[in-house]
Image (cartoon, rainbow, N blue to C red):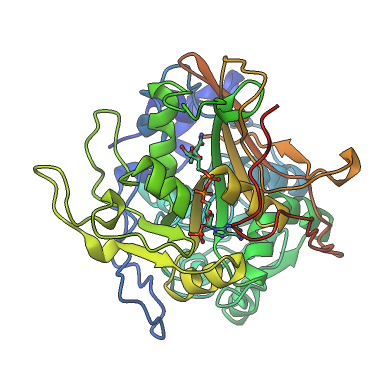
Amino acid sequence: MTTTDSQHEAQGPASTLPERIGAVHERPIPKDTGYLPATTPSTVPLPHNDLDYSAAEYGHLTGVPAARTLNLPGPEQTLSHDEAMSLALEAARQGIRGANPLVGAVITDAHGHLLHVGYHRGAGTPHAEADALAAARAAGTDLTGARMYVSLEPCNHTGRTGPCSYAVAEAGIGELYYAYSDDTENAAGGAAYLRSRGVTVHAMEEFANASYLLNERWFIAAAERRPFITAKSASTLDGFIAAADGTSKWITGPAARIDGHLIRHRADAVMIGTRTTLMDDPTLDARDANGERFEKQPLRVVMGKTEITDNYRIRGLNPPEGVEADPQNFLQVFTHDPRELLDELYARGVRHLMIEGGPGMVGLFAGEDLIDEMVWYRAPIIMGRGKSAVYRLLVDTLAQAPRLQLDDLGMFPAVRVLGNDTATHMVPEPRGTAKDPGERRVLQKLDACRAPEPRLD
Ligand SMILES: NC(=O)c1ccc[n+]([C@@H]2O[C@H](COP(=O)([O-])OP(=O)(O)OC[C@H]3O[C@@H](n4cnc5c(N)ncnc54)[C@H](OP(=O)(O)O)[C@@H]3O)[C@@H](O)[C@H]2O)c1
């Protein structure tokens, strides 16, 4: 799959420079990901992630705008250090949230003329530095003595891709500027390594907070040693997922449902509660716009204590004709404790979890401050009463309510029109700052599974 021109088109006079941006989709994506840590007790092998998160994949959906465009300077213009780092941060937003942070990289010559821009397109694809370096390689640019600006300290470890610190040093970059140091497990040490290789390294502390805030929830998830969590909900305009008589199919239209499948496709695992499993009997697989199963499937997870027997489709034992059974890609975690679920998934190598519902699960995780990203599909239907889309969360007064903010990314503009529905993409309001990461806000919740469902009045 290749990227569309519109995706990489720059605005204004610089629009002749798309080749400066890495065209990663035209390069093979590394298959040897080294994904599962050696100590993982997993019996469920997670698939390699070889996705293309480009607009080419999302573009078939009605109303999906082209990716955000980058405002690139003209060839004569020189960039100050601040301008180059601002561009790297802007490039980072071309990526997509999930198992990895958003990162952008800018390469200039020693005078500040822009050479190449790179960004990270999601787990399993090259990191921002590697993306920019690959664009340089493809264009035959000599990088001896060039400067690189990267919004996060280059990683120093081999994960799904190789260490960026090595690649930067080997490319001949003379000076490296970074905004925020990555102290997360396995990644730290990139700046020190580069210094040891003779590269001049500068931490641009005035940009540390902007870089931190861009990925705050990812840093929180990494520090808590749990997957990054995307929650999805599909409701009426007034926030219900089922009518008073229980009817719920379908509230949103096909385009919104296809979009939801794309989130499943990029997640390592997709989780629902036992009641959704029993009531809806979903397959929970990830399918494309034609209804075909993607090659990469998420781990299908059920949370709750009622045993899901073999006859439920989520178990993967009785697939429809033409589909192979994959019972090994299913996991039930018999718990009501989100932390226990997350520990189990993390130990199995899951770094990006999608919560599909039901509303009890979304409310439960929201009340524990465990939602890092929210995608909310809304249909232009009004019902006045029904089952709330987040009922397990108990907010008594407005000041307690978790607040989210719109999150405008290249592949995920904050608000999209999908057929007759809208998709709003959000992240929680910042919890803190780079210097003071703030505290987790745990809210009151309905307790245990016997708690009554919301009264319909
Ligand atoms: N519109 C949407 O986006 C969407 C998405 C999914 C589902 N749905 C709809 O949502 C409805 C079902 O959702 P739901 O919220 O009622 O059920 P649910 O969240 O799927 O499952 C609730 C069950 O999870 C278990 N559970 C796990 N942890 C728990 C905890 N900490 N506290 C309490 N229970 C816990 C309990 O079952 P155990 O007794 O087994 O432990 C509980 O009964 C269906 O109508 C479905 O169609 C809508």
| 255, above or below 293, in the image | above
Residue 146 place in picture, x, y as percent:
58, 56
Dividing the image into 4 quarters, which one contains the C terminus? top right
Q: Residue at x 13, y 53 (%)?
A: 324
Q: Is residue 196 visible?
A: yes
Q: Is residue 122 visible?
A: no
Q: Residue at x 50, y 66 (%)?
A: 164
Between 367 and 148, which is closer to the camera in this rendering?
Answer: 367
Residue 42 in the figure: left or right of residue 343? left
Determine which quarter of the picture holds residue 438: bottom right
Q: Residue at x 86, y 46 (%)?
A: 400
Residue 27 in the figure: left or right of residue 98? left
| 48, above or below 105, in the image | below
| 87, above or below 291, in the image | below
Between 6 and 451, which is closer to the camera in this rendering?
Answer: 451
Determine which quarter of the picture holds residue 199: bottom right
| Image label count | 0
The extreme bottom residue here reads 39
Residue 183 in the figure: left or right of residue 289? right
Q: Residue at x 30, y 29 (%)?
A: 289
Residue 361 place in picture, x, y as percent:
57, 51
Between 241 and 37, which is closer to the camera in this rendering?
Answer: 241
Residue 456 place in picture, x, y as percent:
66, 30
